[in-house]
Image: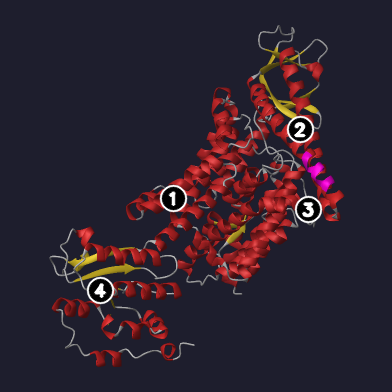
Amino acid sequence: MSRDTLRADITAGVTVALILVPQSMAYASLAGLPVVYGLYASFLPVIVASLWGSSNQLHTGPVAMLSLMSAAAVMSYATPGTDEFIQISLMLALMVGILRLFLGIFKLGVIVNLLSSPVIIGFTNAAALIIGLSQLSKIIGVPFPRSDSYLFDLTGVILQIPEVRWTTLLMAVFAWLLISNIPRLTKKIPGVLAAVVITTLISAWFGFEHKTTVSTDQIKDPAILQAIQTYTRTHDRIMELTEIANSKTRKAEEQLKRGGIDHIKTAGQLRAQAAVANYELEHLKKQNNARRIELNAMTLTGTVNSQGQFELHGKGQPLPEAGSDGRTWRFDGIHNGQISFSAGGAVVGDIPKGLPSFQMPEIKLDLVLALLPSALVMALIGFMEATSISKAIATTTGERVDTSKELVGQGLANIVGSMFGSYTVSGSFSRSAVAAKTGARTGLFAIISALAVVLVLLFFTTYLHHLPQAVLAVIVMMAVFSLIRVKPLIQAWKIDRTGAIIGMTTFFATLIMAPAIANGILLGVALTVLQCLVTSMKPRTDIISRKADGSLGGVRAHKLKPMSENFVPVRFDGALNFMNVAYFEDMILDAHASFPNATTILVVGSGINDIDASGEEKIREVAKRLREVGVSLAFSSLKHQVMSVLQASGLVKELGRYAFYPDKATALKLLTDADTSDYDWEKHEADNPPTETARSPG
């Protein structure tokens, strides 16, 4: 490696690291994980992907889309932030890694072609809205209830706008101004990094968090105290039921492994008990979600009594002589059995120092099948994202991108990462673009960025305690809203309305089905496949005639007069196979019914690219039916591969040489003249000899 290359990679690596650290923490928060897991995901996976991938400028790590999809997939089975949620997220990363590795080894990346452009645009737009608006609660400082309906939860956040915490909102607006304007002033300092550093310093200096824990004796408003105690009891019951449901499920699996009727019966009973616990669990979660929102609207005033003790009083209550501390306090939550109140905004808090240790993700067999659809979609979306980024950069560098190798690299990155505390990762568009722009030449730049994260984990986590959550929310919002594109759907509407409708359906389905957003794109894929099947079953067909300029066109489309009453030229554009032979037959019979006096039906077959046994049999059958009523079936412009099949089957011999014309011009001329005797059929056969297949059908 030359000195210039090394210098370029070091510069690019350091620059990317300045963006990577704040981004990774923001995306971990989006994934429902403690921010340190974003840093873990920016360490080993980055190094592994750079060593095994095919693109020198692609930077792997946490990305917004997969962070949201990870949270959405796991949220149905655990509460965000809990140990169980973390374990399932790591297991999901392992599943995604294995799927990508499998796709790469067997070169199955072509499966991504099932994702049509309108479906991808519809899904990306919906996901970007979901990701961005999911951060709204952190911007205005209110709780975000979690349920099975994202739109219902978002409505709950919007209804809390009157309870906005102004200090939190002002911090978010300030961060947005910094990120937007610093790049205009200087290109040397990333706006994201500047926003993180400046807002963290301000937060620490002015005590942005203003958090305290109190006992029940310090809460002097009976109504608020009762609401908190009810919330606490329900919270404890939720944790208890979660453990019961998980325990019953694990025991049921153990019974099934033992086999035998008695064990299977016991497993069924245990699963029934787990289902009852889960039913109550969901009911209590909904209750506490509503109760949490109500508690946020209840404000208290902090005071100090005559004994110097801190107390919280509700509105309208008489205050001690010492008076108010000038702050408005709100319920923050239950932490380690203590009641927490806040008069400021949420911050990142304590981040564990040190590197992640090796630990295999816990495999929960009952969740593997349940998470498989989400894992497959995440594997494909991540692969599509990574390869599209790589190819975009390759257009400027001239580098050749090996998609299968990239899949292997991304797969190994997720597998290894899951064993060291990383959730699902993929190629990042923003960081890869920065790397390419700053002159990265080899994968060394990514390794340098990962080493910078190591330094943060070892020495700088303490300094990130006061980083406002609202700033991370702004970083996520600005990143994902830039992904929203409407113009491609408008363009698709002009070209392919069915495809555009599928894209819009995917968009609305993803929004409605959120947080299970993987179901939205699966629906889009299903509709795309269905559209392809319908198109294959009903290829474009038409009776053709001459237009005023002498060219050929469809009779119906151009409202043309028939070319002749003696013969009917029809066009069939599509492979003639088992899927559309019935449609082919209907086309021929409709043409005969429309022109009962015609003695020949000519199939212009330039659009027939392939034919199978069903197609050959149907031609034989239709030709026989037409012969019985004195009508001939003829073909023109058949491709070599199609003629080879017909010759090998003996159909050319059965229908006769006059049934096959070399091109449509010859066919139309001879049929118009109603005389084929002067045509040199011997020369035609010499120019189009039977293939080896035709000579040896076996």
Q: Secondary structure at mark 4?
A: loop
**Residue 185 showing in the rendered view:** no
**Magenta segment:** 265-272
Q: Secondary structure at mark 1?
A: helix
Q: Which mark is residue 362?
A: 3
Q: CA distance from mark 3 to mark 4?
A: 72 Å
Check disc 4 and report the residue beneath it: 631
Mark 2 is on which residue type?
A: Ile
Which quadrant of the view contains residue 406? bottom right
Query: Considering only order in the chain, which callout, 1 or 3, is on the residue closer to the N terminus?
Result: 3
Mark 4 or 1, which is nearer the eye?
4
Q: Position of residue 5 (x, y in %)?
A: 57, 70
Pick whichever, 311 or 414, lies toward us: 414
Query: Considering only order in the chain, which callout, 2 or 1, is on the residue closer to the N terminus?
Result: 2
**Are the residues tagged 4 and 1 within 8 Å (C-beta)?**
no
Mark 3 is on which residue type?
A: Glu
Q: Which mark is residue 502?
A: 1
Mark 1 is on which residue type?
A: Ile
Mark 4 or 2, which is nearer the eye?
4
Local crowd size for mark 2, using a 10 Å CA cut-off: few (<14), some (14–19), many (≥20): many
- The correct choice, above or below, for 534 with respect to 286 in the image is below
Q: Overall secondary structure of the magenta stretch?
A: helix
Pick whichever, 205 or 625, lies toward us: 625
**Residue 525 showing in the rendered view:** yes
**Are the residues tagged 4 and 2 within 8 Å (C-beta)?**
no
Q: CA distance from mark 3 to mark 1?
A: 38 Å
Q: CA distance from mark 3 to mark 2?
A: 22 Å
Q: Which mark is residue 238?
A: 2
Q: Position of residue 470 (x, y in %)?
A: 60, 36
